[in-house]
C-alpha cells in the first residue's frame, strides 16, 4: 500500500499513515495497533521526552473527593516547572500557537502560561474503547465528508488519514452520554466589568435515549436544551437543538422559547457564524464547545502532529475555592490559576471554501491526541489577520470517566474583550452525568414547559 509522510512542525513526531480515499476505513492490520503501540483511542502510547507514557489515565477520584461534590485537584501539591511570559515566549515559539504568541504581545504585563509536569489523565470506559476499535474498520465518511456511516459512539477515526477525520473525532467525542449542568458565562468589558449569565443545560446523545431507534434515528447525534436562569432580562429564554450527524443532508433543527412573548419559534440560523446565546457578539454558534456543527464550509488540511503547551488538568478552575472575581480579569482570565502541560496534538488547518461565507476565513486547530478534544484554536478574519484565540481548559471528570472542558475561553485580539463559558465555582457547580431521557423530553412541548417553570 502506498504510504505518505505527514509533515510535522517543531519537535513533532513523524507519522506514516496510509493514503486513503476520504470515505475509506482503516485496514484491520492498522486497527490492530489500538491498545498496543497506540492507546485504545489512537494516541501514541509510549513516552517521548517530557511526555510520559499513557498508562490508562485517571480512573479513580483522589483523596478528599465526595460523590456529587466539587472535583478535587489530584495535583494540588505540584508547582510550575517554569512560566512562559512576554520576556521569554519566543524561546517556546515551536510549542505555542500564533494566537498564544499574540496574547503575549497584546498583554505583556499580565498574560503568562505556568507550565506544570505532564499527566496523561484522559480515559474513557471500556465500552467506548470497544466501540472505537469497531469504528476503526467500519466507520466511513459519507456525502463528501459531511456525515458518518456505521457509527454509534466512541472515536470514529482513531487512526485518521486526513484533517476532516480529525475534526469529526472532536465533534462527536464522548461527553458522558447524558449530562445536566449549570454553568456561568461572562463577556467582560475591557476594564473587566461583567454580568454573569447562568445556564442550565442538558445534553443527551442518541444511544442514551430510551426510545432511540437506530433504523429511524440514524442521523441524530444528540439533543441539547439550554435554559437561561439569569440575569432577569434573559431568564426564561430556552434554546432547543436537535443535532444531526450530516447537517448538509438534514440541517440542525433548533427552536427558541421567548419568555416575553411566551412563544416558540423555529431558529434555523443557530449554526455556523450566527451569534452565540447571550454572547454579546463575542462568539459564533460554532464556537460553542470550541467547535461544533457541519464542517462543509471549510477545506480541512491535516498538517501533522506536534508537541505543544496546552491547558490541561485545570482543576484549580473547578475547585470551588475561587470566586469569579478571582478568575475574571481585564483582557483575559487570571493566568495564575491556569495550568499548561506539554502534550502531543494534531494540527489541522481549516480554510473557507470558495463561494462559502463565514466570519472566520481560516481556523487553525490543535487537538489533544489523548481525548480528541480541541485545546487551542486560532481564528483569522477575511483579511488573513489573527482575530480570536480559543483555549479549552480541560479536566478529566474522573467521577464519570469523561475528559471534557472545565472552562472554554475565546479571546478577541481586536476588541480586547473575551468570553468565558463554564464557570461553576460559586452557586453553579452542578455537573450530573447519567439519567434516562427520551426524545419527548426534547420536544417543543417540553421546551414550553421548561420556559414557563
Image (spheres, rainbow, N blue to C red):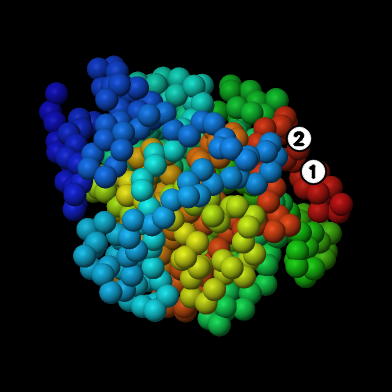
- Give 95 or 382, whichever is nearer the viewer: 95
Seen in the picture, residue 304 relative to 391 is either above or below; the reply is above
The picture places residue 383, in percent across and down from the top left corner, at 32, 73
Q: Is residue 140 left or right of residue 394?
A: left
- Is the Cβ of the residue at disc 1 closer than 8 Å to that at disc 2? yes
Q: Mark 2 or mark 1, which is nearer the start of the sequence?
A: 2
The residue that mark 1 highlights is 446
Q: Secondary structure at mark 2?
A: helix
Seen in the picture, residue 370 relative to 77 is either above or below; the reply is above
- Res. 244 image quadrant: top right
- Cα distance in 3D space between marks 1 and 2: 7 Å
| Residue closest to the far right | 453
The picture places residue 278, in percent across and down from the top left corner, at 64, 66
Report the disc number at residue 440. 2
Report the disc number at residue 122. none
Seen in the picture, residue 127 relative to 361 is either above or below; the reply is above
- Give 389 or 360, whichever is nearer the viewer: 389
| Structural crowding at the residue carrying mark 1, measured as other residues with C-alpha within 10 Å and reported as few (<14), some (14–19) or many (≥20) | some
Quarter in which the N terminus is drawn: top left
The picture places residue 65, in percent across and down from the top left corner, at 63, 40
Identified at 39% across, 21% down, the residue is 133
Q: Is residue 89 left or right of residue 436?
A: left
Identified at 62% across, 70% down, the residue is 325
| Residue closest to the far bottom | 191
Q: Secondary structure at mark 1?
A: helix
Identified at 54% across, 73% down, the residue is 329
The picture places residue 318, in percent across and down from the top left corner, at 59, 52
Please state the total of marks drawn on the protein image: 2
Amino acid at each position: 500500500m502506498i504510504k505518505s509522510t505527514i509533515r510535522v512542525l517543531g519537535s513533532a513526531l513523524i507519522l506514516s499513515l496510509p493514503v486513503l480515499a476520504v470515505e475509506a476505513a482503516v485496514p484491520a492490520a492498522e486497527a490492530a495497533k489500538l491498545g498496543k503501540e497506540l492507546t485504545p483511542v489512537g494516541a501514541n502510547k509510549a513516552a517521548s521526552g517530557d511526555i510520559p507514557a499513557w498508562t490508562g489515565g485517571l480512573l479513580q477520584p483522589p483523596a478528599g473527593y465526595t460523590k456529587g461534590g466539587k472535583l478535587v485537584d489530584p495535583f494540588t501539591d505540584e508547582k510550575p516547572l517554569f512560566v512562559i511570559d512576554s520576556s521569554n515566549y519566543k524561546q517556546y515559539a515551536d510549542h505555542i500557537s500564533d494566537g498564544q504568541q499574540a496574547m503575549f504581545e497584546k498583554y505583556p504585563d499580565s498574560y503568562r502560561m505556568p507550565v506544570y509536569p505532564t499527566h496523561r489523565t484522559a480515559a474513557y470506559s471500556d465500552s467506548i474503547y470497544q466501540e472505537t476499535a469497531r469504528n476503526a474498520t467500519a466507520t466511513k465518511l459519507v456525502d463528501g465528508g459531511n456525515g458518518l456511516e456505521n457509527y454509534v459512539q466512541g472515536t470514529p477515526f482513531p487512526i485518521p488519514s486526513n484533517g476532516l477525520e480529525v475534526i469529526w473525532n472532536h465533534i462527536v467525542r464522548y461527553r458522558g452520554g447524558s449530562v445536566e449542568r449549570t454553568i456561568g458565562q461572562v463577556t467582560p468589558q475591557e476594564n473587566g466589568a461583567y454580568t454573569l449569565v447562568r445556564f442550565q443545560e442538558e445534553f443527551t446523545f442518541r444511544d442514551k435515549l430510551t426510545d432511540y431507534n437506530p433504523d429511524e434515528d440514524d442521523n441524530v447525534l444528540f439533543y441539547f436544551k439550554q435554559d437561561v436562569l439569569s440575569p432577569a432580562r434573559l431568564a426564561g429564554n430556552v434554546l432547543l437543538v436537535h443535532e444531526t450527524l450530516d447537517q448538509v443532508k438534514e440541517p440542525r433543527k433548533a427552536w427558541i422559547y421567548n419568555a416575553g412573548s411566551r412563544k416558540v419559534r423555529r431558529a434555523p440560523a443557530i449554526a455556523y457564524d450566527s451569534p452565540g446565546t447571550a454572547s454579546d457578539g463575542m462568539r459564533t454558534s460554532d464556537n460553542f464547545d470550541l467547535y461544533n456543527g457541519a464542517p462543509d464550509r471549510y477545506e480541512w488540511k491535516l498538517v501533522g502532529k506536534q508537541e505543544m503547551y496546552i491547558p490541561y488538568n485545570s482543576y484549580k478552575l473547578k475547585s470551588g475555592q475561587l470566586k469569579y472575581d478571582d478568575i475574571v480579569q481585564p483582557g483575559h482570565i487570571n493566568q495564575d490559576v491556569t495550568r499548561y502541560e506539554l502534550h502531543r496534538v494534531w494540527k489541522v488547518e481549516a480554510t473557507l471554501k470558495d463561494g462559502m461565507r463565514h466570519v472566520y476565513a481560516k481556523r487553525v486547530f490543535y487537538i489533544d491526541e489523548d481525548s480528541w478534544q480541541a485545546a487551542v484554536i486560532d481564528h483569522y478574519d477575511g483579511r488573513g489577520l489573527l482575530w480570536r484565540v480559543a483555549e479549552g481548559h480541560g479536566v478529566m471528570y474522573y467521577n464519570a470517566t469523561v475528559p471534557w472542558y472545565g472552562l472554554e475561553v475565546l479571546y478577541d485580539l481586536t476588541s480586547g474583550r473575551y468570553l468565558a463559558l463554564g464557570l461553576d465555582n460559586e452557586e453553579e457547580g452542578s455537573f450530573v452525568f447519567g439519567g434516562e431521557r427520551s426524545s419527548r423530553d426534547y420536544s417543543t412541548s417540553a421546551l414550553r414547559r421548561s420556559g414557563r417553570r
